[in-house]
Image (cartoon, rainbow, N blue to C red):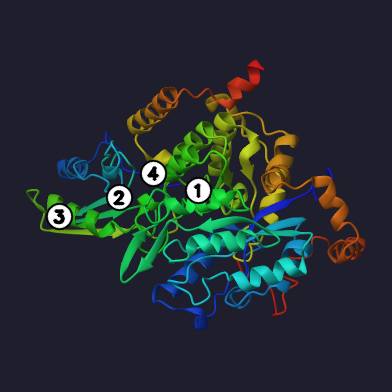
Amino acid sequence: MSSAITPDQSFETELEAAIRDELMEVLDPCSCMSEHPVNIVDLGLIEAIAVDEADVEITLLLTSQRCTYFLDINDEIRERVGALPGVETVEVHQDTSGEIWTRERMSEAERTARRQRFYDQMEAAGITPYAERSQSD
Amino acid sequence: MLDSGALVVDSVSHCFNHTPENHKHPHAQRWDDETYDLGAKLLPDGYVPSEQVFYRDHQPEELARLLFLESQIDYTVYHSLPLDDYFHDGYVSREKGFEFLEQNPNRSSMYVDINPLEDDAGDQIEAFARRDGVEGIKFYPARYQNGNDLSLQLTENSVWPLLERIADSEVDTLAIHKFIPFATAPVRYFTPDDVEDAANSFPDLNFEIIHAGFSFIEETVLAMASHENVYANLENTACLVNTRPKKFARALGEMLYWAGPDRIVYAGGATALHPQPPIEGIWNFEMPEELRAGEDYPEVTKEDKEKILGGNALRLLGKDPEQIKKDIEGDEWDQRREELAEDGEYPAAAWSTYDTQAAPADD
């Protein structure tokens, strides 16, 4: 199974790290409809960053092959990464190898925060897990 | 029937029409192809239909053989579909559903599709709900009209009054497609948030969320845990037990942990999918130790599996399992199963009972 580029991954060049930092400014459009927007690096959408001198290629593995927001994400990446010093061209590809996005691709911090929000929501709703209720019967 | 003698109930079957003549919109071909691809991804080797079997107008007689000879399913709920914005017959026609009911009255019920935007939708609900064998209504969360994807969330003004009509009708269950986005409809239409509102306001109606566990699992278990009238229908999700077992284990584990085993129902998803692999997969399923220890997911007992594979669905339908067993004992399908079993050929090989030169796709 491939793994996503992570927020704290180390790179051989400063440019690659700068690109990753720039990608962390791009928010996932779907998450923006919730109260907790998440950037595309934390979400685990970045499959690869390839730099050939001034030419940059970024490969995304989307949560759905049919993501209708690919064009929006593509536009924002090209604009942000294209503005970095030393970058002349930016291409954004969608990984269609059959690899599937899974929650394990999310950053540890994002997964933990997300799970905590879920527990908070359950608690706010006054829900005791069935498994705990049935044990105490 | 399971080895334990418990009935297997399939909570969604269809007779799809995947022929080009049925296409009404340019996206229809995409629907067909994506439905085929989904099956290719979700089914184990040997169970993916050949294109010759798949791309056709599936008939009630073929569905019956597929369910009752090629799988352990004893009873099924046929869902017609309201996709007449893309397909001339809605993709899964009501007519074929009623034909199927007539041919298999002791082995089937039906949920009838309704397009909430039709002027007489409420009257249609009332009339269909009175017909023999109809036990529920089926909605989709979006509709494509005049170049736009219209939201048909249950909370929309165009839809909400119809919930009252269902509550006043002869049926008490609404099934709604969720979790698998289609065509160009926005992803937000596929979350269960609107179902929660509806379940809260209509406590006497049951809400069966189709494809539960495929995505938005936390939102789903929140809805299930907070509302006793929300059911998880595992159409397509059930197939993950074989082809993406970790995802399946997590989805089932969350449901069992938060909401318990009584409102989860298996569905085979025929004719788009072969229904037998997930039955065997669920019956043999064991919660991985790492998820039991790490997430506190419970062990899945034999009783849980019997509920998921049939018991829960019969309770939802208001059917007595012992009566169903009496009604189907010695019927045509029971006899044909016996004959196959005598030759060691039951369940029959995948797609082997189809009229066409059937064979699984080369994997």
Could you say which disc has been placed on residue A3 in the image?
4
Secondary structure at numbered mark 3: loop
Q: Are marks 4 and 1 on the same chain?
A: no
Q: Residues within 10 Å of mark 1 (few under 14, many from 20)?
A: many
Q: Amino acid at mark 2?
A: Ala
What distance separates the C-alpha of mark 4 from that of mark 1? Answer: 21 Å
Which mark is nearer the camera, 4 or 1?
Answer: 1
Q: Residues within 10 Å of mark 3 (few under 14, many from 20)?
A: few
Q: Amino acid at mark 1?
A: Phe
**Chain of the residue under the numbered disc 4 shown in the image:** A
A60 w.r.t. B228: above or below: below
Q: Which residue is mark 1?
A: B214
Q: Which residue is mark 3?
A: A53
Q: Quadrant of residue B254?
A: top right
Q: Residues within 10 Å of mark 2 (few under 14, many from 20)?
A: some
User: B69 and B105: which one is in front?
Assistant: B105
Q: Amino acid at mark 3?
A: Glu
Secondary structure at numbered mark 1: loop
The answer to whether mark 3 and mark 4 are in CB contact below 8 A is no
Which mark is nearer the camera, 2 or 1?
Answer: 1
Q: Position of residue B84 (x, y in %)?
A: 47, 72
What distance separates the C-alpha of mark 3 from that of mark 4? Answer: 24 Å
